[in-house]
Image (spheres, helix red, strand yellow):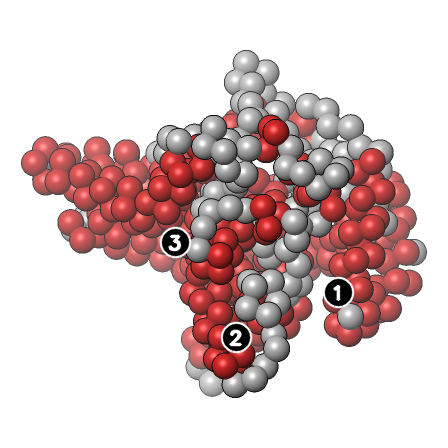
Amino acid sequence: MTERRRSYAWWIVAAVLACVLVNPYVRGDGNGYYAWLVSPVIDGDLDFTNQFQRADPLFQTLIFEPDGTVRPEARTVTGRVGNQWSVGPAVMWAPWFLVAHGGVTLARALGATVPADGYSWPYVWLVSMGTALYGMLALWLSARVATWLGYGRGAGLAALGIGLASSLPVYQVFLPFHVHALAACGVAAFLAWVVWRGRVLSAVDWAVWGALAGLMVQVYHLNGVLVLPAIWVWQRSIAAGGWVPAIRHGVLFVGAAVIVGLPQLVGKTLLYGRPWITGYQDQFIWSDPRLWQTALSPNHGWWLWTPVVVIALAGLVRVWRSHAVMRPWVLAGVVFYVAVASYQNWHGQSSFGNRFFISLSVVLVLGLAAVADWAAARGVSTRRTLAAAIALLAVWNMGFMFQWGTNIIPNRGAVSFRTVAVNQVTVVPARLTGFLRRYLGDRQGVQDEVERGDVRQRREYEVVR
């Protein structure tokens, strides 16, 4: 078997494993994202009341009074139940959902009783597997970007490191109805396109790139920060070909982005009366960003919870020196960081690590690949040392994820890393095998147990900035 075929075989194995382990659980924010798909396809409307009535208990408290009526503040100026979550995930999930819906409709015509309601097992399983595969696509595209930029010797190890030792696997496999794996895929596709196409983009290239930008931002609004490098590329096109083609390319880029973003624009207009209103009431406090805490706080600090990113960020120094074309992307990542630090909920509340930064997975893979490529150039022992370090971080991350996901440690607020470390060698080994057995045999029962623990923790949690 050639090296390339062996590589593809490993990617396929990883994708299949992700699909087997995926948890078809619509929870938390996922209820809002998923409702944008279920309501129009199944009900033919944008009345989310019945979708939100099927949500987990904590989500329902955001929408309904104790007597089951809709909270006044949950209604919009158009009289509809609000849905602040973006429409883009529904766009990406639509192919998987429609296949499930077609299969369920056919099965019911043949006498089956499986509900055609968007929430029965064919729907949630296929959509969940779609998320798992989008996460794998994000990692594969990231590895390709690293290879195209000359870090092929470290690309596979880097993708494995971010795929196992970051926050991505939580939202790719265990909470697949959240947005973050999809956001990582959108950003990876956006960057991969321009790196693949090279220094000179044709009119078609600009149109495709704009469409990818529209999808990336529609999926996750904060990804709009990562469109900034397109301005630098556009300015470079002016120097290369003059103003006339550059203006044409800019119009194609923006036009394609708007067309692809129409589901978001139309949906929000119908709900809130204006296309630019998302429904979010959260604030960005630009004058007082939590720069230090966002990285190193026990309350979901990005570097502290997922230390593999520190190695990746160090590698970006090498990328900065070697590839001027990537400097705007690194700078956009810095702006992204400041934006998260300025957000009122910079810690993400119930978040494994800092989930907002999963969007930057492609940049992290590139940085980690640069480190791995450097290690390979230094010799076998250095490369093995780095691989061992990444493997150790991955094992730590898996145990940490288990503690967080099963409420062994608080899933909101700060954690004691001394307690986490003790649990890694005492509680996790004792419970993990039994949990996996129950998870593979009765995922609904495990979900119900986790949900009850989550409700208990939420009662004791007070949101602080």
Instruction: Read off the residue under disc 2.
Output: 104
Numbered disc 1: secondary structure: helix
Q: From mark 1 to mark 2, how far is it between C-alphas?
A: 21 Å
Q: Residues within 10 Å of mark 1 (few under 14, many from 20)?
A: some
Q: CA distance from mark 3 to mark 2?
A: 31 Å
Q: Please say if 14 is above or below 329.
A: below
The residue sitting at 32% across, 41% down in the picture is: 325
Image marks 1 and 3: residues in contact by CB distance under 8 Å: no
Report the amino acid beneath label 1. Answer: Gln
Residue drawn at x 54%, y 79% is 108
Which residue is denoted by mark 3 in the rendering?
189
- Mark 3 or mark 1, which is nearer the start of the sequence? 3
Q: Position of residue 340 (x, y in %)?
A: 55, 30
Q: Secondary structure at mark 3?
A: helix
Q: To which residue does mark 1 refer? A: 444
Q: Earlier in the sequence, mark 3 or mark 2?
A: 2
Residue at horizontal 84 percent and vertical 48 percent from the top: 453
Q: Secondary structure at mark 2?
A: helix
